[in-house]
Image (cartoon, rainbow, N blue to C red):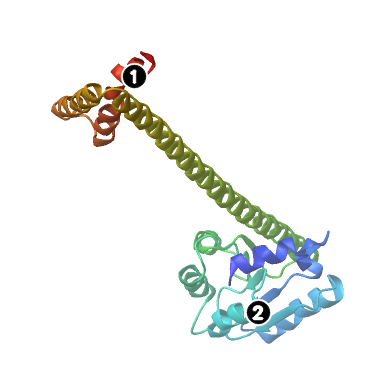
Amino acid sequence: MRDANRSEESSKGHPMMQVDPIKTARILIVDDQEVNVHFLEGTLRWVAGNTNFKSTTNPREVEALITEFEPDLILLDLHMPERDGFMVMEDLKQTLPADAFLPILVLTADVTPEAKQRALAGGAKDFLSKPFDTTEVLLRSNNLLQTRLLHLELANQNQILEVKVQERTHDLQKANEDLQAAHRDLEDAHIEMLERMALAAEYRDDDTGEHTKRVGQVSAFLGRAMRLAQDQVMLIRRAAPLHDVGKIAIP
């Protein structure tokens, strides 16, 4: 069963969005006794008003039916020949996604505490002993379906939230890249201004020009000796000649 698809359905008007989810939910009946299967089918059809169900007396067909039918609830007998309900639940643990919530209501004539405890530990969400009360079966089924509906809605909301987080993260990354680009442009403009002012000082006086070059070279040498970063060394080399920039205005 694909929970992601079912989550999407819940946001687009999944049939379980009704007030009484048992009327339209997909229900799978698994019992080796045909009389029990017919009884449950009749209960769903004539009492609950649900015709959206499938049934099988062969527990080996369960995995294929889940893939094909994608049920919202499984009504499962425990003691069946060849493959019992415990084995079916163990198989589902191996095949269903870890975050899937496919409720199983066990219906069995085994009333021993051991059977009930083993079923609940094996993955069943609820347990009823045969002979069971029709109304109780429907009420318990409805409760499990409502819980599944909440699970699907939560999964859908988490998916929407994840998309929004990804979009927000992308926007922040883009804004950060734009900010870094603007910072680089500002640095380039600053450096260009320094170079132009140093060049103006050089044009003003040849001696000053040679002197400013030497100041820049020495400053860069000292910066490297101090183990400054290369970009800092280059900035110092370009800015150092400005110590004579005041001579530009000297007549």
Label 1 SS? helix
Neighbours of disc 1 within 10 Å: few (<14), some (14-19), many (20+): many
Q: Hey, which residue is sitting farthest front in the picture?
A: 251
Q: Is residue 26 visible?
A: yes
Left/right of residue 138 with respect to residue 191 in the rendered view: right
Give residue 105's quadrant in the image: bottom right
- Which of the image's four quarters has the C terminus? top left
Which amino acid type corresponds to the residue marked 2 in the rendered image? Answer: Phe
Neighbours of disc 2 within 10 Å: few (<14), some (14-19), many (20+): some
* Residue 69, numbered label: 2
- Which of the image's four quarters has the N terminus? bottom right
Left/right of residue 155 with respect to residue 223 in the rendered view: right
| In the foreground, 1 or 53 | 1
Q: Residue at x 36, y 28 (%)?
A: 194
Residues under numbered marks 2 and 1 in contact, where contact means CB atoms less than 8 Å apart = no
Q: Is residue 36 visible?
A: no
Label 2 SS? helix
Which amino acid type corresponds to the residue marked 1 in the rendered image? Answer: Val
Q: Residue at x 61, y 83 (%)?
A: 32
In the rendered image of this protein, does residue 173 appear above or below residue 63? above
Instruction: Choose the circle earlier in sequence order: 2 or 1.
Output: 2
| In the foreground, 234 or 58 | 234
